Amino acid sequence: MTTNTGALALEQLGNVPESYRHAWRVAEPHEPIVLPQRIFKWYHVHLDGVAVPDAMDAKARALLTADATSGQWQTEYGLDFALLHLSTATAFLIAGTWRGHQEMWERVYVKDLATGEPFALVQREGEDWPGACVWELGVICHERMAWHRYLFTPRREEDKRAWLADTYTGRV
């Protein structure tokens, strides 16, 4: 199928307000969360020079640990990842788990930084709900390829260790 994009009228699409200024963020791996039946690679995503506070990291790790060991999560492979994104007004905790060999399933938690309320699981309402922003997708895309690379291996002990070491650091 060929589309003549020159004939499309785009003036009504993609009109991000001029006042919005986009900026790079950075992703950095931290010590993984190791649980009895699973491991999460652990990332921070934030503006360059604005680190995730240690207390927020500790609370996010504790929440993810409690939820992941509650017996309510499916643990198919146990090689998972999570990221803590310190945004401007909100913090997001996103946990990705691999199921069905090649499917990433996701849990998203949100924290309003102005109120200081704890992280809360985003409840699905309607057909659309948050997945990930452009910065979080940097980590998710890397983890997609890390899992892809892992699936092409014999999946022995050394391959699992290589997957665990396969993390991303840099601009997102």
Image (spheres, grey):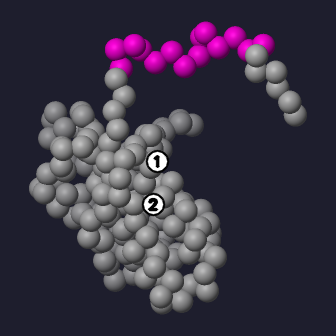
Q: Position of residue 127 (x, y in %)?
A: 57, 37
* Amino acid at dot 2: Gly
Instruction: Please tell me which residue is depicted at 54% across the width and 68% down the height of the picture.
Output: 147
Which residue in the rendered view is the most extreme toward the front? 170
Q: Residues within 10 Å of mark 2 (few under 14, many from 20)?
A: many
Residue tagged by mark 1? 137
Dominant secondary structure (helix, strand or loop) of the stretch shown in magenta: loop
> Which residue lies most toward the bottom here?
157
Residue at image position (14%, 41%) is 116
> Of the residues shown, which amino acid type is indicated by label 1?
Leu
Q: Is residue 112 left or right of residue 80?
A: left
Q: Quadrant of the N terminus?
A: top right
Q: CA distance from mark 1 to mark 2?
A: 12 Å
For residue 116, the mark is none
Snapshot quadrant of residue 100? bottom right
Between 46 and 68, the residue placed more toward the observer is 46
Q: Is residue 93 left or right of residue 103?
A: left
Q: Position of residue 137 (x, y in %)?
A: 46, 47
Q: Which residue is mark 2?
A: 96
Q: Label 1 crowding class (10 Å Cα cut-off): few <14, some 14-19, many 20+?
A: some
Judged from the image, the secondary structure of the residue bearing numbered disc 2 is strand
Residue 37 sits above or below residue 66 on the image:
below
126 lies above or below 93: above
The stretch in magenta equals: 7-20
